[in-house]
Amino acid sequence: MLGSWLWILGMGFFVGQIVGRLGLPPLLGMIGVGILLGPQMGNVLSGEVLAAADDLRVLAVMIILMKAGLGLDREKLAQQGSVALRLGFLPATCEAVVVALLGMGLFGLDFPTGLLLGCVIGAESPAVIVPGMLRLKSLGWGVTKGIPDAILTGSALSDVLLLLVFSLLLSFLGQGAEESLNLLGMQLSPLQWLPFQVVIEIAMGLVMGYLGARALVSLLTRQNWTRNTVQDVLLAACMALWLVIFPRVWPYFSGYLAVMAMGFFLIELDTPLARRLRSGFDALWTVAEIVLFVLLGAALNLSVLGSVFLPGILLLSLGILLGRGVGWWLSTLGSNWNLRERLFLLPGNMAKATVQAAIGGIPLAEGLAGGETILALAALSILVTAPLGAWSTQGFAPKLLEKGEVDPTKVGSQGKVSFLAAVDTSPLAEAVLRKVADLARRVDGEVIVLHVTDDPQGIPAQQLQQLSQRLLADIRYQFCLRSGPLAETIVEMASERQVTDVVMGKRGHRGWEQVLVGSTSQAVLETSPIPVILVEENGLIAGRAPSPKALPSGHVAAQRTLKNTKEH
């Protein structure tokens, strides 16, 4: 079993990275690794891992839905009105009906079995759509009109609907007769009961998500049961997993919707806590993504694809273009989306993977007629739409969507944090290096140590290099020597390396004694387009944001001065 995990994580990571560097979605490489390692080809994965694949996929989907909830924007959803709600019902319904009709004509299925196939094929993949939409949010594509948020919410609602209809049809086809249900003295068939069940599961899912968010805020913020972010994420993951599996015992709410709602309500109840959890679930997804898609590839049955390949491609194409096309058009009627933004729904909302892998084999396992065909088409939909949807989402977003301002409270921070430490030969050099080391450790950042001198081979420069090596031993840093005017060289280096902040002494001597005391730091403060942190001789720090006149045209920065603030 340990060897299987080594294959999954090791090969999944490296092959995914290689495929990503070729400009293709990394998940395509991960699925390929699963096919190679799975029982269809290499057969190197242990039976214990394959037996636990379904539960592991549930865990991975829980993580990605929690990430989705922590990235939703209430204001953008309210701005769209009913668009997100319509996206949750109309495209999936239209595609399921079209697929059912095509299944009858192409594969000879009866209408209930064709509709069962439509529920399998019409479901959307949170494992592909959620990372894609969160990436668009982090880059700003479509955020002004809330397009990624509407797609995220709509995909979650559509899966709730289709999974309910799938379970109803499965029961009907398996039993051959409908069992009536009693509601307030009225006898209802399962089909008549379905609308009430959909409303109840969605409403109870939102309620359970809200209660889960309230419980987490109470435990993690008010009662302080945890001591660090890792423990925060551990408890939040346990709560989310409980929401996912509890409907197996009490099937009156959608567990996946409840998890997504819990993340959304956490933003509203405690934004700092939501930010900490978002970074933690980002780290969890790094591992869960590999496990999810490798096991997805291992579960694909390639032996049954040959007979349904060409008609299956036709069914998928017409289902997406006709079925979803009509649904998308109806969903965006009356919205402020233009034609290009509506067209983006084709690549942005077409991917299928996790739901198809989870339920595609159930009809065959239940012994239903047409079950083998349903399984083959589910596998084909994954192989075609998952990589195509992941690639086209990122490829067409710059062409079809407008770029807006990114809301940092709804997405994780992007990029590496780096600091420029400008040091001279005064005793302040050690204080500057200690301060920049503390800042870099807090955010896992990098440091560039700059010493401006006309004698790069001199003893003072060597001593500063040794001091940097001692104080920054556990931090990735680079020691640079340059000559030239002090302030101009510091500002030039900071802009060239695009550092986050400049850290320097407020007063210096020796190497800087040819200028007025403090004039270098003042000159850097006035001209730097990057925030500056000054370390004073008494161990205190002062800082200031870049001056507006030092910023490029079109940018505005608020000025601030942090004086007499104790170092911590």
Image: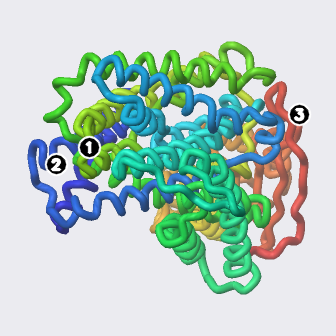
In the rendering, at what x and y percent does residue 372 appear?
22, 38
Label 3–label 2 contact, CB within 8 A: no
62 lies left or right of 21: right
- Amino acid type, callout 2: Gly
Residue 410 in the image: above or below residue 239: above
N-terminal-most mark, 1 or 2: 2
> Which residue lies under the disc numbered 1?
297
| Dot 1 crowding, Cα within 10 Å, few <14, some 14–19, many 20+ | many
> Which residue lies under the disc numbered 3?
549
In the rendering, at what x and y percent does residue 298 appear?
22, 47
> Which residue lies under the disc numbered 2?
38
351 lies left or right of 250: left
N-terminal-most mark, 1 or 3: 1
Mark 1 or mark 3, whichever is nearer to me:
1
For the point 17% across and 33% down, which residue is it? 304
Q: Quadrant of the N terminus?
A: bottom left
Front residue (pair 351, 312): 312
Q: Quadrant of the C terminus?
A: bottom right
| Dot 2 crowding, Cα within 10 Å, few <14, some 14–19, many 20+ | many
Q: In terms of secondary structure, where does tag 1 sit?
A: helix
Q: In terms of secondary structure, where does tag 3 sit?
A: helix
Q: Residue furthest top?
A: 339
N-terminal-most mark, 3 or 2: 2
Q: Residue 269 is drawn in which quadrant?
A: bottom right
Label 1–label 2 contact, CB within 8 A: yes
